[in-house]
Amino acid sequence: MTARSRQFGKKNEELAISFLKRLGYRVIEQNFRTRMGEVDIIARDGDTLVFVEVKARRSTRYGHPKFAVTPAKQRHLSIAALSYLKKTGNGGARARFDVITVKYAGGMPTVEHFKNAFDLAYG
C-alpha cells in the first residue's frame, strides 16, 4: 500500500469516526489488528458493540465501495471481531457489523452508513 493510499484511508476513517460520533456512538478502538484481519473502528451504539468497516472510493469507476466488502473480507472481519470479543472478555456481548462508505464527487465526500451490513461469517 502506498503512502498516498494510507493517507486516503486514514482521512476516510476519521470522516467515519466523526459521522459515528454525531450519531451518538462511542468509539472504543481504531485499527484493531489480528493475524487474520483488521477492524477499522470498534464502537458502542448503546449496549451494542459495533465492528465497522470503512470503504472509500475516489470515483465510482469500480462500482460502489460497499461491494468491496466481499464474503472473504466478511470472514476476515468476523475472525478479527471474535478475537476482540475473546481478548476483552465480551464473548456474550450484543454485537453487529456495520459498513461506512465514502464516495467522492467533485472532491466532496458523501458518507453512507449500512447498519447490520452482514452477519458473522466464518468457515
Image: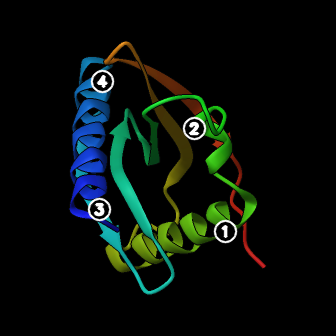
| Residue name at image x 34 percent, y 50 percent | 41
Question: Looking at the figure, which quarter contains the C terminus?
Answer: bottom right
Label 2 to label 4: alpha-carbon separation: 17 Å
Q: Disc 1 marks which amino acid?
A: Arg
User: Viewed as shown, does residue 66 lie left or right of 84?
Assistant: right
Residue holding disc 1: 75
> Between disc 3 and disc 1, whose residue precedes?
3
Q: Earlier in the sequence, mark 3 or mark 4?
A: 4
Name the residue type under label 2: Pro
Secondary structure at badge 2 equals helix
Q: CA distance from mark 1 to mark 2?
A: 18 Å
Mark 3 and mark 1: Cα distance apart in space: 17 Å
Residue 22 location, quadrant: top left
Closer to the N terminus: mark 1 or mark 2?
Answer: 2
- Sequence-wise, the earlier of marks 3 and 2 is 3
Residue drawn at x 29%, y 42% is 13
Q: Which mark is residue 19?
A: 4
Which labelled disc corresponds to residue 31? Answer: 3
Residue at which label 2 appears: 65
